[in-house]
Image: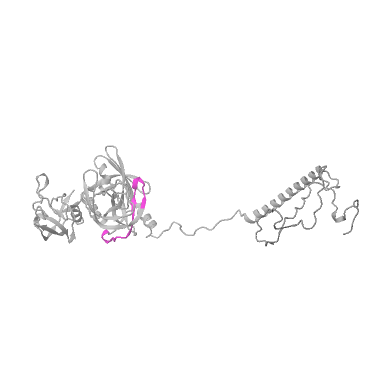
Amino acid sequence: MTDQPPDSPPPDDERRAPDPWAPPGRAVPPPPGPTGQDTVAFGAGPLDTRPLGDVPVDHDTVVLDPAPAPEPAVGPAPGSGWSPLAWVAVVAVVGLLAGLLGGVVGFTAASRHDSRTLDPGATLPAVSGDPTARPTDSVAGVAAAVLPTVVQVSVSATDGTQDTGSGFVIRRDGYILTNNHVVAPGATGGSISVTFNDGQSADATIVGRDTSYDLAVLKVGVHSLPTAVLGDSDAVQVGDPVLAIGSPLGLSGTVTAGIVSAKDRPVSAGDGAGDVSYISALQTDAAINPGNSGGPLVDMKSRVIGINSSIATLGGTTGGQTGSIGLGFAIPINQARRIAEEIIRTGEAQHPIIGVELDVRYAGPGAKVAARGTNGQPAVVPGGPADQAGIQPGDVITAIDGVPVTDAEQLIVAIRTHAPGDTVTLTIKRDGQETDVSVTLAPSTG
């Protein structure tokens, strides 16, 4: 190393120019130390460690962060002659020009975008043909075919109470079929009107009603009405899809869908006035609610197979006072057709009887002929069908046409599926012995 006098200046690479931006009186930092200040050996003193990630580590030395480079000074360069105010003016002008240029560019881009995408005469393709067309055997197709034949029945009783039910047109000249329990409140001094699917209304009169089958026929002074097509309820099978149409809770034109859940279901229902109807019903899970009574149950060929009449309640009875739980019952149309025809011809209908009074307290199995009749009448009508067949008080009827009978209600329902004049075979149990007898059913009205 060359010795230098103490007063001689340091070499060029060790000189440091004075900092023009340093505060007055601030000392200029000394030059870097000699070689060896850039590394520190392990064990030389405490170090501030930090994660190194994937960088390999030399276990002999730890590289210290180099001294940060001094940040560039803000403001005019030394000796430029520009004051800080001048620099502020320059920056403002440059910012204004940049903003104007950006606006011009954005407007130009937007204009080009609008001209490429907007089409004042544009239209989108539409569905061709009739979008409302449905297959005739679909739910929508069946509903469209049957709804014009269904009416809402409104009844006002003499005490001012009002109720609604359903019905459907069975003849073009104004005959409408419904339930007896729908029109019964208006049968003695009340009023009845019907509202058609198109919203038109008309007053109605009762042609006749049958409490035993819970059926009634109304007549309106309107002609050329669309009529329902009546099907064959004997041909219905369990599982067949069906629709129930009517005015539940006064909501006219309501359609619900389901299946035939069972056939020949013994059902008895009252009209609230003491009359009881006995029905060998079609059971369905199509939703039926109060107000559906009298409306049609139709198959998927738009044919009426039943008349919605009652629903099962959670209390185990049948009636129309609670919501649907998927157990609705309809009068088979084959029974209803015969009753309606008789009512239109004569004003009343006949139902078949065997001429006995049954003991409803008997727990079964079977239906027991009462030991004595009520009001002093004999339990077996003299000269009636049962008397002629040799049936006696106390006999138990265990089957009809080979089908077991569980109780009195089931026997009545089974007999009501027939017409007066039909012959049935009854199995009679007496003194522990069973025998078959033939009985020709007699007519009765009411």
Residue 216 magenta-drawn? no
Q: Quadrant of the N terminus?
A: bottom right
Residue 24 is left or right of residue 300, and the answer is right
Q: Nearer the viewer, residue 93 or 104?
A: 93
**Compared with residue 407, is residue 82 higher up or lower down, i.e. above or below?**
above
Q: Is residue 203 above or below residue 439?
A: above
Q: Which residues are magenta?
A: 233-255
**Residue 173 in picture, x, y percent from top left:** 30, 51
Closer-to-camera residue (33/17) = 33
Residue at x 36%, y 53% (from the top left corner):
256
Which residue is pictured at 38% across the width and 55% down the height? 144
Query: Between 149 and 47, which is closer to the camera in this rendering?
Result: 47
User: Could you say where residue 429 lies in the image, as x and y percent from the top left?
Assistant: 11, 58
Q: How many marks are shown on the rendered structure?
A: 0
What residue is drawn where x is 21% and y is 44%? 274
Q: Is 341 displayed left or right of 396 in the figure?
A: right
Q: Residue furthest top?
A: 159
Residue 276 position, x and y percent, is: 21, 48
Residue 142: quarter of image = bottom left
Q: Is residue 340 left or right of residue 28?
A: left
Q: In the figure, 275 relative to 33: above or below?
A: above
Q: Quadrant of residue 21?
A: top right
